[in-house]
Image: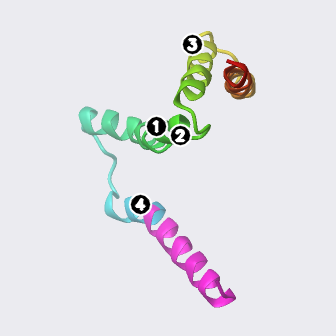
Amino acid sequence: MNTMSIVIYIAVMAGVTYLIRMLPFTLFRKEIKSQFFRSFLYYVPYAVLSAMTIPSIFYATGNMVTAVIGTAVAVALAFFRQPLIVVALAASAAALLADVVMGYL
């Protein structure tokens, strides 16, 4: 991959990112009064983040069992409102420990 193609990729990503952030400001000049539409827009970032993250979670370890164990630990700790760093580290440790234990079985 040469330097020029990297520069083109970065320029395209910058342009797309700018358009995504700029278009709502230019298209919706008035305040959105529809309660349904406002609540819909409120949940869009969470839905998009979940749609991008959840599939990656289950294929990150290369073993579905260890991924499910790590996810279960993360969900349990998040349910009890633990800090994000605790959730992430504990889920990673649980997946690693499950992988080590499964190696011995």
Question: What are the residue bounds of the magenta stretch?
Answer: 1-20
Q: Residue at x 52, y 42 (%)?
A: 56
- Sequence-first tag of 2 and 1: 1
Q: Where is mark 3, residue-wise?
A: 79
Residue 103: x, y in percent? 70, 25
Scheme of image coloration = rainbow
Q: Where is mark 2, residue-wise?
A: 59
Q: Quadrant of residue 66?
A: top right
Mark 1 or 4: in front is 1
Residue 39: x, y in percent? 33, 33
Dot 3 lies on which element? helix
- Sequence-first tag of 1 and 4: 4
Q: Quadrant of residue 26?
A: bottom left
Q: Residue at x 52, y 30 (%)?
A: 64
- Sequence-first tag of 4 and 3: 4
- Amino acid marked by disc 1: Ser
